[in-house]
Image (cartoon, rainbow, N blue to C red):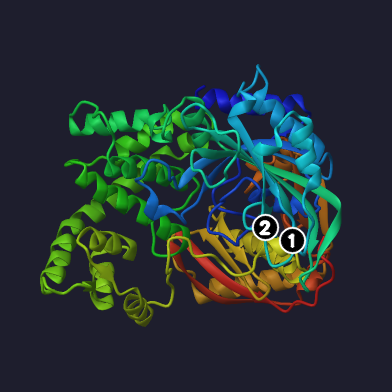
């Protein structure tokens, strides 16, 4: 089964079960800023999992594009990816375990669906602990479907539990489904530690609410959240050892071979896999409006592109290549993700610019690196690149620290990361220490503080458009209980007068104490009403619109204050560059809020 067929069958199956198909949300989180990227299908749906009504109802399904950078250093082996597609379905206070498990079993084993023999499947359930009991219901449901008890493993919380998204909130046990990828005969007893059993699907049952004092209380409204990776399942269904061996990556490898003027090798190298994987991920990130830079998502994007460029050189590429690989990604995925074609010109220009910038310094930086390591005597056992030298490579040649670490590892060296961080902080106020630096706090907790700050981003956005122009568009936000951070498109540094005028406009609306009005309507009606549709593409044909007097009207799904007066006052603390063409504002409010709505 090809990936396209898997996607369509999944959506078709859940549509037949009464689920509305929703579009993939952007890779840049809107309502869950606890991570840099959307890392799972549930992230865009956090407000609805926490109780807000979804415009399309209580049963949803989609194919969500995701980025996970925690394993970025492992990309290059046969299995790890940074970008992937997640098939998901949700029940928002509707059906629960019985229907979810029966649906999963039917889709996996049904002849008109995946048609997987039952004997190739195994399952895990939550074993129970002092906070929550053994998930006997899930266990018995699998047994009722004919699964042998020898194929059901009871595992602890670290293996079979999800959440909460923040320190408190909805959470619960999950049940995972595994597929045997090894030779026949299949072991009668399921051993979860045997790597030949590969997880292919996960059903999460949100049935508890974790309180601030650490208690797990049963929820009145229970949710189901599931996830199945397109790349992994496609490889399994095709009997491939790796997703890199499927049609998902073959066109990218073929273009890489064309660029080098070679015939396809019998086996792909680590460098080749890094090039095609990182280029696919970078293309999707660019399509969502992020450009290469020094912090946050922009930093991850630059790291992916520059690592791909270096590995392409290792793989024998001697000419500019990024635009050609990106074009293949765009052409292959634009039907499912039209934002790729819509932003094609910008994507290709950014690749060309970044490749030109980095290639000019890569060779010189590598020569400088060789100088550093040549000065270390051969008899030294623990060879180290100093933090000072690692920072020099970053500051002078644009080498992300991870690239220096990787180059050092190839030569048998380590890098003094602590020394690097100390040097970095002396020269820059903003930094990112790792591949996936997470923010603290976030909208996921739905506290009154974050609800008010979220409301403030609507007012700020409108005020920026009034002062700077209609080209201003939100490029991301991060909110915790103390402050908001708002990224927006604008080419120039704001003047003090512009900042003062934005503050004045927002505070004027706060003082008018407008009610925050929530309405559900069709996407077409929302646009006709003048609502700004920043994230409308993820809700389908019905959306939620929040209005504040005649000042602000936006399509949104997050928590909000009840009245603009709850914000008390608004103050911009800082205005700075985020990445090329994107500015960033950090601001605070007075806050004396009532309950979020």
- Hey, which quadrant is residue 399 in on the image? bottom left
* Residue 297 shows in the view: yes
Quote the CA–CA distance across marks 2 and 1: 8 Å
Percent x, y for residue 518? 82, 52
Query: Where residue 57 sits in the image (x, y, percent)?
Result: 80, 39
Residue under numbered circle 1: 129
Q: Residue at x 59, y 54 (%)?
A: 29
Q: Is residue 423 above or below residue 268?
A: below
Of discs 2 and 1, which sits in the foreground? 1
Please give the name of the residue rendered at 36% of the width and 77% of the height, measured from the top-left corner: 418
Residue at point 71%, 68% (across, down): 450
Where does the image place residue 228, in percent across and percent down from the top left?
60, 38
From this view, report whether residue 278 is shown above or below residue 388. above
Q: Judge the density around disc 2: few (<14), some (14-19), many (≥20) Cα neighbours within 10 Å.
A: some
Q: Which residue is located at x 25 percent, y 55 percent?
A: 357
Crowdedness near tag 1: few (<14), some (14–19) or many (≥20) residues, C-alpha within 10 Å: few
Q: Secondary structure at mark 2?
A: loop
Q: Residue furthest right?
A: 220
> Quick check: marks 2 and 1 in contact, CB under 8 Å?
yes
Image check: 27 left or right of 381?
right
Between residues 195 and 309, which one lies in front from this camera angle? 195
The image position of residue 408, as x and y in percent, is 24, 63
Q: Secondary structure at mark 1?
A: loop
Residue 411 occupies which quadrant of the picture?
Answer: bottom left
Pick whichever, 378 or 207, lies toward us. 378
**Along the horizontal axis of the image, is 441 left or right of 426?**
right
- The residue wearing badge 2 is 157
> Looking at the rendering, in which quadrant would you find the C terminus?
bottom right
Q: Is residue 514 left or right of residue 118?
A: right
Q: Nearer the viewer, residue 469 or 366?
A: 366
Between disc 2 and disc 1, whose residue precedes?
1
């Amino acid at each position: 089964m090809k990936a396209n067929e898997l996607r369509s069958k999944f959506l078709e199956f859940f549509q037949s079960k009464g689920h509305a198909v929703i579009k993939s949300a952007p890779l840049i989180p809107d309502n869950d800023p606890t991570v840099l990227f959307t890392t799972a299908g549930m992230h865009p749906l956090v407000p609805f999992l926490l109780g807000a009504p979804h415009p399309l109802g209580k049963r949803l399904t989609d194919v969500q594009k995701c980025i996970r950078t925690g394993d970025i250093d492992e990309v290059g082996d046969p299995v790890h990816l940074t970008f992937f597609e997640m098939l998901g379905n949700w029940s928002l206070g509707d059906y629960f375990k019985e229907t979810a498990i029966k649906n999963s079993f039917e889709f996996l084993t049904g002849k008109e669906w995946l048609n997987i023999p039952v004997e190739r499947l195994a399952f895990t359930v939550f074993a129970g602990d002092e906070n929550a009991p053994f998930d006997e219901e899930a266990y018995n449901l699998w047994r009722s479907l004919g699964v042998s008890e020898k194929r059901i493993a009871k595992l602890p919380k670290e293996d079979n539990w999800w959440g909460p998204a923040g320190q408190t909130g909805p959470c619960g046990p999950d049940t995972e489904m595994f597929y045997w990828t090894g030779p026949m005969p299949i072991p009668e007893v399921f051993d979860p530690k045997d790597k030949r059993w590969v997880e292919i699907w996960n059903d999460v049952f949100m049935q508890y609410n974790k309180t601030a004092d650490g208690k797990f209380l049963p929820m009145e409204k229970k949710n189901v959240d599931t996830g199945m990776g397109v790349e992994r399942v496609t490889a399994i269904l095709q009997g491939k050892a790796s997703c890199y061996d499927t049609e998902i990556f073959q066109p990218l490898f073929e273009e890489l071979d064309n660029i080098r003027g070679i015939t396809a090798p019998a086996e792909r190298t680590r460098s080749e896999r890094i090039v095609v994987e990182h280029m696919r991920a970078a293309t999707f990130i660019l399509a969502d409006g992020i450009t290469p830079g020094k912090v946050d998502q922009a930093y991850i994007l630059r790291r992916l592109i520059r690592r791909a460029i270096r590995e392409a050189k290792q793989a024998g590429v001697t000419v500019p290549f990024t635009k050609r690989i990106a074009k293949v990604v765009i052409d292959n995925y634009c039907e499912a993700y039209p934002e790729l074609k819509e932003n094609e010109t910008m994507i290709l220009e950014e690749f060309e610019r970044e490749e030109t910038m980095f290639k000019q310094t890569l060779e010189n930086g590598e020569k400088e690196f060789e100088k550093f390591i040549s000065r270390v005597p051969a008899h030294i056992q623990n060879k180290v690149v100093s933090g000072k030298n690692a920072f020099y490579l970053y500051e002078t040649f644009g080498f992300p620290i991870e690239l220096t670490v990787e180059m050092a590892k190839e030569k048998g060296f380590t890098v003094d990361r602590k020394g690097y961080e100390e040097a970095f902080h002396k020269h820059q106020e903003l930094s990112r220490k790792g591949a996936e630096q997470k923010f603290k706090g976030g909208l996921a907790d739905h506290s009154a503080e974050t609800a008010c700050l979220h409301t403030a981003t609507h007012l700020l956005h409108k005020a920026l458009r009034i002062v700077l122009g209609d080209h201003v568009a939100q490029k991301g936000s991060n909110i915790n209980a103390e402050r908001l951070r708002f990224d927006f498109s604008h080419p120039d540094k704001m003047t003090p007068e512009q900042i003062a005028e934005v503050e004045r406009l927002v505070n004027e609306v706060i003082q008018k104490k407008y009610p925050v009005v929530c309405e559900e309507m069709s996407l077409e009606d929302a646009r006709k009403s003048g609502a700004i549709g920043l994230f409308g593409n993820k809700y389908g044909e019905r959306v939620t619109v929040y209005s504040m007097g005649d000042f602000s009207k936006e399509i949104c799904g997050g928590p909000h204050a009840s009245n603009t007066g709850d914000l008390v006052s608004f103050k911009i603390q800082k205005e700075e560059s985020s990445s090329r063409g994107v500015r960033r504002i950090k601001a605070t409010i007075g806050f004396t809020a009532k309950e979020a709505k």
